[in-house]
């Protein structure tokens, strides 16, 4: 997983209205709509109505390489933009989690160097960013393509996001091919899919050949120049969760809007909608304010 930089995200939370308009023009859906589609939430209006009553907390985590300036503020800004009652905790790490629980947060989002997770403490459930990001970008590709059932889709990159993208594509009845610069990773993924889902996916021999025969693409690598202008036709549509963007500037110009790419919004939107669904399906288990060892 590529570690984001402050440069990657510093403008995101200030440009969300414009980004929403861009998403509507490309997919017909807003960030909330794509997140809801990714989470399998059918009634977006009900989700929009419920969002303000779902308190969420974003906790800075200083472990490992430490905080990324702007990261928790950007995550929180995306949640607030979608209508959720979100805020960043004053404290970080364990103190931040305690603060979140004591303030009644029903969803707590935090990221260390290895994972970015939304926690639903009262339901005992978690939502992983890699899986949510994959489902969000596949939901967007579905809208761009006018449905994926029976269509050939190429997944480039067999890391966590690419692997979960295969699962999301199979759920939408797509015909999936995978390719990775390390062929063994693609072969391993095909074997895992066969065992876990009893489904068959094709392993492409190399990226160049695969790109010559596919118009629907999920670009999930951590490389910059994977898809070039020569690979783009009038029917090409690309969902590109990979960071940095694996589609070259000339290819993006030729795509003329038939591409989805962002460093955090779609993944965070899918996480939030999945967490909201978990809460809706599993009401509170006990008195949400009581906590043990409370000082008298
Ligand atoms: C979650 C992002 C998506 C892509 N790469 C992932 C990444 O950059 N992970 C590291 C996140 C560290 C956050 C830091 C903080 O500011 O709390 N611990």
Image (cartoon, rainbow, N blue to C red):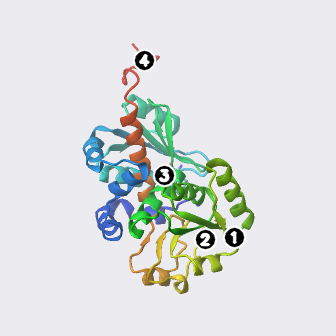
Tell me the tag on residue 113: none
Could you say which is closer to the camera, residue 232 or residue 176?
176
Q: Secondary structure at mark 4?
A: loop
Q: How far apart are labels 3 and 4 at the CA level?
A: 35 Å
Q: Nearer the viewer, mark 2 or mark 4?
A: 2
Q: Secondary structure at mark 1?
A: loop
**Mark before the other along the chain sequence, 1 or 4:** 1
Task: Determine whether 2 is above or below 67 in the image.
Answer: below
Question: In which quarter of the view is residue 265 placed?
Answer: bottom left
**Residue wearing tag 2:** 223
Asked whether the beta carbons under mark 2 and mark 1 sit within 8 Å of each other, the answer is yes
Q: How far apart are labels 1 and 4 at the CA level?
A: 54 Å
Quadrant of the frame with the C terminus:
top left
Callout count = 4
Q: Nearer the viewer, mark 1 or mark 4?
A: 1
Question: In which quarter of the view is residue 37 placed?
Answer: bottom left
Residue 120, image x and y in percent?
Answer: 45, 36
Q: Is residue 1 visible?
A: no
**Mark before the other along the chain sequence, 2 or 3:** 3
**Residue wearing tag 4:** 294
**Residue wearing tag 1:** 181
**Mark before the other along the chain sequence, 2 or 4:** 2
**Mark before the other along the chain sequence, 3 or 1:** 3
**Mark before the other along the chain sequence, 3 or 4:** 3
Residue 251, image x and y in percent?
Answer: 49, 82
Q: Secondary structure at mark 3?
A: helix
């Amino acid at each position: 997983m590529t570690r984001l930089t402050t440069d990657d995200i510093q403008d995101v939370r200030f440009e969300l209205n414009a980004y929403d308009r861009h998403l509507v023009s490309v997919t017909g859906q807003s960030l909330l709509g794509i997140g809801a589609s990714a989470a399998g939430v059918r009634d977006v209006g009900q989700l929009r109505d419920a969002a303000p009553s779902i308190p969420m907390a974003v906790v800075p985590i200083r472990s490992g390489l430490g905080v990324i300036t702007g990261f928790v503020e950007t995550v929180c800004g995306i949640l607030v933009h979608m209508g959720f009652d979100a805020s960043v905790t004053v404290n970080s790490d364990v103190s931040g989690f305690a603060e979140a629980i004591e303030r009644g947060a029903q969803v707590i989002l935090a990221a260390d160097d290895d994972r970015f997770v939304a926690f639903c403490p009262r339901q005992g459930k978690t939502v992983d960013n890699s899986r949510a990001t994959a489902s969000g970008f596949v939901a967007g590709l579905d809208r761009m393509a006018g449905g994926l059932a029976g269509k050939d889709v190429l997944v480039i990159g067999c890391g966590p996001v690419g692997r979960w993208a295969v699962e999301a594509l199979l759920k939408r009845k797509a015909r999936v091919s995978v390719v990775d610069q390390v062929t063994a990773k693609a072969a391993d993924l095909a074997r895992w899919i066969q065992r876990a889902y009893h489904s068959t996916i094709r392993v492409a021999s190399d990226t160049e050949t695969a790109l010559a025969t596919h118009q629907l693409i999920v670009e999930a690598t951590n490389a910059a120049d994977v898809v070039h202008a020569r690979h783009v036709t009038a029917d090409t549509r690309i969902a590109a969760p990979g960071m940095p963007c694996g589609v070259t500037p000339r290819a993006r110009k030729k795509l003329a809007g038939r591409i989805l790419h962002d460093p955090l919004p779609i993944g965070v939107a899918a996480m939030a909608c999945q967490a909201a669904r978990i809460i809706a399906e599993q009401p509170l288990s006990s008195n949400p304010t009581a906590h043990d060892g409370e000082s008298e």
